């Protein structure tokens, strides 16, 4: 999958998302987790960042916002190419009112149309997506490492475990476990529940078409209910996609990046 490198401190992944008849490309911005200049942040963001007691968490939080600001800028530029893109500190990404974490709330100073974002951080990198067409988007980045059997039982249904165990290569199976977990997490962010919902409520299956791996998502009744009641959207599907990125920012580490967007039928 295409990975465009722009400078040394930002990757833009052009991630194809699939579901049967649907295919779209979502741009995922990946940045290193580090401190960024205060000037790039709005006062409300700076205030919240200063409240974190643990520095690692503050740095992750800041970096996630940095990735989200970049993703929002890309989204706005694509939708309104002739308008001035807002400066970083004019894009404000906060948790829900009164919370420390939760679905990111995007506000653009002077903006006239709503923009939505989802973000993630894992072991040295932060990733984000943004969209104007649907609030139901989710992204997840996961450092690739082997998972133990209790993780498998907690995350996957017996049917999913069986499908995964059919993968002969240990290495391919190990990565596929991380990919499917990451897709689940991305979908649970898009639904807005996070892990407050049993992970078995989002079932991820995989297959190969024309030599390309694709994944499909089915929602269990609780996920369906949380999603429909929470969002007011129905009658559609979650398109999902992923990429595996290696030696990111020269760290020598590999990560899975998974992304999803809800597409309404006929939309
Ligand atoms: C949402 C959740 C799945 C993310 O997991 P994580 O391991 O922190 O992973 P990531 O780094 O990929 O994502 C974190 C980001 O997700 C976003 N997020 C948090 N809760 C969210 C929700 N309910 N819906 C959508 N996005 C959410 C936030 O932007 C957060 O980053 P920030 O706090 O820096 O702003 C997890 O925080 C969660 O479910 N929390 C609910 C509490 C819970 O049950 N925890 C038990 C863990 S087993």
Image (spheres, rainbow, N blue to C red):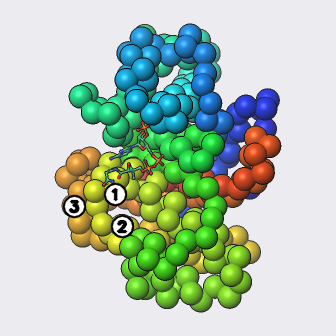
Find out whether the residues at labels 1 and 3 contact each other: C-beta distance under 8 Å: no
Within 10 Å of the Cα at label 3, are there few (<14), some (14-19), or many (20+) other Cα atoms?
Answer: few
Find out whether the residues at labels 3 and 2 contact each other: C-beta distance under 8 Å: no
Nearer the camera: disc 1 or disc 3:
1
Q: Is residue 199 left or right of residue 62?
A: left
Is residue 143 visible in the rendered structure shown here? yes
Q: Earlier in the sequence, mark 3 or mark 2?
A: 2
User: Which residue bears the numbered disc 1?
Assistant: 195
Q: Residue at x 60, y 47 (%)?
A: 123
Q: Is residue 25 above or below residue 173?
A: above
Q: Is residue 6 left or right of residue 63?
A: right
Q: Is residue 132 left or right of residue 172?
A: left
The CB of the residue at mark 1 lies under 8 Å from ligand 1: yes
For marks 1 and 3, give the CA distance.
15 Å
Q: Is residue 247 above or below residue 90?
A: below
User: Which residue bears the numbered disc 2?
Assistant: 199
On residue 60, which mark appears?
none
For marks 1 and 2, give the CA distance.
7 Å
On residue 225, which mark appears?
3
Q: Position of residue 188 (x, y in %)?
A: 38, 56
Q: Position of residue 173 (x, y in %)?
A: 63, 78
Find out whether the residues at labels 1 and 2 contact each other: C-beta distance under 8 Å: yes
């Amino acid at each position: 999958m295409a990975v465009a490198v722009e400078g040394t401190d930002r990757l833009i992944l052009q991630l194809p998302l699939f579901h049967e008849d649907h295919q779209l490309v979502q741009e995922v911005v990946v940045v290193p987790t580090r401190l960024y200049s205060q000037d790039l942040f709005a006062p409300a963001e700076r205030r919240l960042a200063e409240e974190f007691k643990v520095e690692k968490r503050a740095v992750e939080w800041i970096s996630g916002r940095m990735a989200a600001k970049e993703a929002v800028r890309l989204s706005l530029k694509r939708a309104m190419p002739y308008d001035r893109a807002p400066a970083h500190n004019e894009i404000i990404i906060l948790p829900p009112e009164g919370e420390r974490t939760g679905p990111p709330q995007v506000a653009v100073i002077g903006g006239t149309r709503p923009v939505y974002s989802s973000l993630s951080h894992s072991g040295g990198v932060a990733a984000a997506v943004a969209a104007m067409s649907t609030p139901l988007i989710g992204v997840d980045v996961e450092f690739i490492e082997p998972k133990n059997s209790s993780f498998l039982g907690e995350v996957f249904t017996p049917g999913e475990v069986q499908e995964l165990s059919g993968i002969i290569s240990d290495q391919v199976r190990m990565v596929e476990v991380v990919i499917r977990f990451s897709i689940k997490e991305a979908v649970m962010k898009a639904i807005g529940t996070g892990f407050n919902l049993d992970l078995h409520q989002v079932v991820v299956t995989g297959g190969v078409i024309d030599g390309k791996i694709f994944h499909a998502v089915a929602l269990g009744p609780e996920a369906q209910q949380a999603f429909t009641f929470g969002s007011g959207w129905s009658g559609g599907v979650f398109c999902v996609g992923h990429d595996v990125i290696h030696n990111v920012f020269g760290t020598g580490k590999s990560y899975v990046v998974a992304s999803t967007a809800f597409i309404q039928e006929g939309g």
